[in-house]
Image: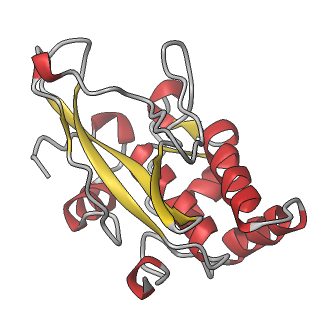
Amino acid sequence: MKEYLKETRSINYSHPLVQEKIKELQKQSNSSLEYAQKAYEFVRDQISHTWDMRSNIVSKNASDVLKNQTGICWTKSCLLAALLRGNGIPSGISYQRLTRLDDASDGYILHALNTIYIQNQWIRVDARGNKENVHAQFCINQEILAFPIRKEYNEIDYRNNSTDLDSRLVEILEKSANILDVRADFDY
């Protein structure tokens, strides 16, 4: 479990902005479960998904997402992991390969979501942000993720549990000046 509590360059929970948000969420919570749900709902509902906004802002890690109030799924998952780890709740990152459009005509994207160890079990949640046709929820006994896998389009749910954002994604973010130009066309 130590690996799922460590701080990384992407999951930088000791940053003052992240620490401030952790303390705010702690004051609103009476249990680890309540804290985890509040952290999830904050990231899902209060942090905009950059592509939905059609903004070019590149948030590269958890503190950038808080500072910019926006991020793509890769970095929104880093923020949620930072808020959880900074409060002693193990968290990781899981991936899905999804179509870029409603079909496979424009290729695929690598979508990130979170794993959380809570109530003696690992659960997966997706804080990407809800919108029309996307209704992800925080649930202990059932996964309600942003995107169901469509096998007819060769989408893949890797169901993995990584301890950090994939280094290839970190490199893409570091080199990017406009998030709308970002593509990650590799399989995980």
Identify which residue, 30 or 67, lies in the foreground: 30
The N terminus, quarter of image: bottom left
Of residue 177 and residue 179, the one placed in the foreground of this image is 179
- Vertical order, 36 against 7 (above or below): above
Going by the image, does 1 lie left or right of 104?
A: right
Q: How many marks?
A: 0
Task: Residue at 57% x, 48% y: name it.
Answer: 140
Name the residue rendered at 62%, 51% in the picture.
Answer: 68
- Between 121 and 115, the one nearer to me in the picture: 121
Residue 8: where, in percent of width, then height?
43, 79
Where residue 32 sits, quadrant-wise, is: bottom right
Residue 162 position, x and y percent, is: 30, 66
- Where residue 100 sits, quadrant-wise, is top left
**Which residue appears at 57% of the width and 55% of the height?**
65
Q: Is residue 131 above or below residue 172?
A: above
Is residue 97 in view from this perspective?
Answer: yes
Q: Residue at x 37, y 59 (%)?
A: 93
- Say left or right for 4 vs 81: left
How far across and how far down the image is residue 154, in percent? 10, 26
* Relative image position of residue 163 (x, y in whole percent): 35, 72
Which colour style is shown? secondary structure
Taking 136 as reference, is 152 left or right? Answer: left
For this orientation, the residue located farthest to the bottom is 2
Residue 106 visible at all? no
Left/right placement of residue 180 relative to residue 33 reads: left
